[in-house]
Image (tube, rainbow, N blue to C red):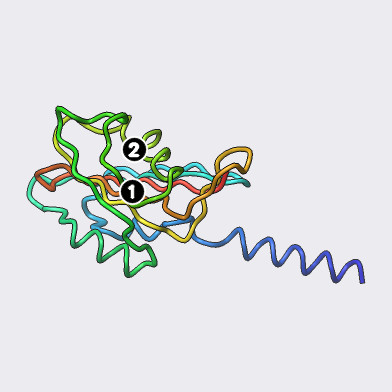
Amino acid sequence: MKLQLLIIACITLAISCGRARPAGFWANFHEDLLIESRSDHGPWGGHSTWLWKSDTTTFTDAAVIDFAKKNGWTIADSLTLLADTINSTNLPELKVDAYSVDLLKSTVIPRLEPGDCTIIIFKTGWMAVEPGNARETFVNGFAVSNAAGTRLTIYHQWGE
């Protein structure tokens, strides 16, 4: 009996560890223009970032939203930031929870390139939990595109 339980536990662990990384579907978005993919996964959470660049292709908001929607992400809000006003203290009021705004301020805004940009905020189905389990959110995916639409970055954070 103990051996059977051990075998079942090992099979369950192997199956769950073999799953694709959270939001890994983004690697299939304009694969030919993907120049960077980074992720850090641990037993309690992680984060992933994808970056696309093109001299000619335009990454439209509609295409990003459509691709995300086909893969289970839903749009929660969006905002446009002008180059001279980009900082985490003067964001417009958003339709997302306070922890999502904190993730935006700590994860996305500090990494923005100079210039105007659009940020699309997504509900991902993966939960992000503030350390200490104080707050949690499913709104933890962010797509950032420059004004020309030639650069796109996806940020996704989940777990604690």
34 lies left or right of 24: left
Mark 2, other Cα within 10 Å: few <14 / some 14–19 / many ≥20? many
Mark 1, other Cα within 10 Å: few <14 / some 14–19 / many ≥20? many
Give the residue at x 25% y 66%. 66
Q: Tag 2 or tag 1, which sits nearer the N-term?
A: 2
Residue at the extreme front of the image, as rendered: 93
- Locate residue 82, reporting x and y percent: 15, 35
Residue under pointer 2 = 108
Is there a contact, CB below 8 Å, between mark 1 and mark 2?
yes
In the image, 149 versus 134, the foreground residue is: 134
In the image, 150 versus 133, the foreground residue is: 133
Give the residue at x 31% y 43%. 36
- Locate residue 35, reporting x and y percent: 27, 44
Q: Secondary structure at mark 2?
A: helix
Which quadrant of the view contains residue 114? Answer: top left
149 lies left or right of 154: left
> Residue type at mark 1?
Phe
Residue under pointer 1 = 142
- Locate residue 103, reporting x and y percent: 42, 40
